[in-house]
Image (tube, rainbow, N blue to C red):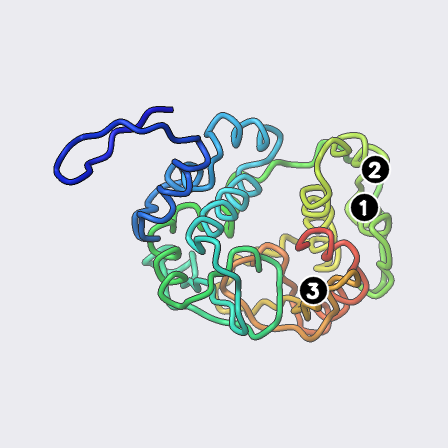
Amino acid sequence: MKQKINYKGKDVEIDLTPQQIQRAMRQSISYTDIKTLADALAYLGETTASFEQRTTFDDDAQKAYKELEVICQAIRQGNELGEFWYYPWFTSVHSSLGFSYCDFGYGSAGAFVGSRLCTETSEKATYVGRQFIDIFDRFINGVKLSQPTNLTSKRKVFKDYTDIKTFKNACEALGISEQAFHVEHQSLPDDAYAYMQLRIISKALNTCENSEYTNKDKRAFFPYFYSVSSPQGFSYIFGGKTAGIGVRFTYKTASIAEYAGKQFLKIYNKYMS
């Protein structure tokens, strides 16, 4: 592919491979030049058509998550996450100001739901949170979540959340057919399939109520994991209070969050790995 460059004041045509052009583009731009999803896709060498194709069957919140994955990967510019991982933090959507960027947070050698959306510096986390706030809003608040089409006529009543020990139990608590769920989502990749499972699990453990609370004064909790970077994947550490990324899989109490993180560790591992 011929490209024009300026050499010693003269325009010269040279032949470059697509890979060389991509490498030159990456070296010539700052992360602040990535202002849209299209910019991030171009930086990573993926077409918009390809991205649209691989997100065809996602609901809007899940698609927003994958958009943010692409964006954060591009913003990191090939840099590895070090000892500290930084992520944007937001104010409550229920305030009169609506959903707005607040601050950045960080974790040390850890991982949580949404940890793929981390950057290696606080400056980049701040930039991502402000520049792409509309996409974070779609992901965190899930205003266009698809509704389950695999409901059964009967729900099973569990006396305590600790009685919900399997994904099948979670389906039973919500009156969802596990077999129908599998048929509907079997074509999804492992992480997307696990995402759909965790949506059901979080609702079931929260006594069949939506875990995105309408009362802005309530605290929500999420499981936190240790990233061991080994075949064992993630291991549970503790639960934390949240108003940030990954809020959809939050729980009413710290004890429920801890139970979810330990009992459904394999599903979390598939989602985050």
Question: Which of the labelled discs sits on residue 229, or is there none?
Answer: 3
Q: Given contact means CB atoms under 8 Å apart, are the residues at marks 2 and 1 in contact?
A: yes
Q: Residue at x 52, y 32 (%)?
A: 51
Q: Tell me which corner region of the image, top left, top right, bottom left or bottom right, holds residue 246.
A: bottom right
Which residue is farthest front? Answer: 8
Residue 37's spot in the image, x, y percent? Answer: 41, 40
User: CA separation, marks 1 and 3?
Assistant: 31 Å
> Is 168 positioned to the left or the right of 5 in the image?
right
Question: Which of the labelled discs sits on residue 123, or is there none?
Answer: none
Q: Residue at x 71, y 68 (%)?
A: 228
User: CA separation, marks 2 and 3?
Assistant: 35 Å
Q: Residue at x 48, y 59 (%)?
A: 79
Name the kind of residue labelled 3 in the image: Ser
Secondary structure category for the residue under label 1: helix
Above or below residue 145? Residue 89 is below
Name the kind of residue labelled 2 in the image: Ser
Label 2 neighbour load within 10 Å: few <14, some 14-19, many 20+: some
Secondary structure category for the residue under label 3: loop
Q: Which residue is mark 1?
A: 171
Q: Given contact means CB atoms under 8 Å apart, are the residues at marks 1 and 3 in contact?
A: no
Q: Quadrant of the N terminus?
A: top left
Q: Which residue is mark 2?
A: 177
Residue 10's spot in the image, x, y percent? Answer: 14, 33
Q: Residue at x 65, y 69 (%)?
A: 224
> Is 272 positioned to the left or the right of 232 in the image?
left
**Disc nearer the start of the sequence (1/3):** 1
Residue 197's spot in the image, x, y percent? Answer: 74, 47
Secondary structure category for the residue under label 2: loop
**Disc nearer the start of the sequence (2/3):** 2
Q: Nearer the viewer, mark 2 or mark 3?
A: 3
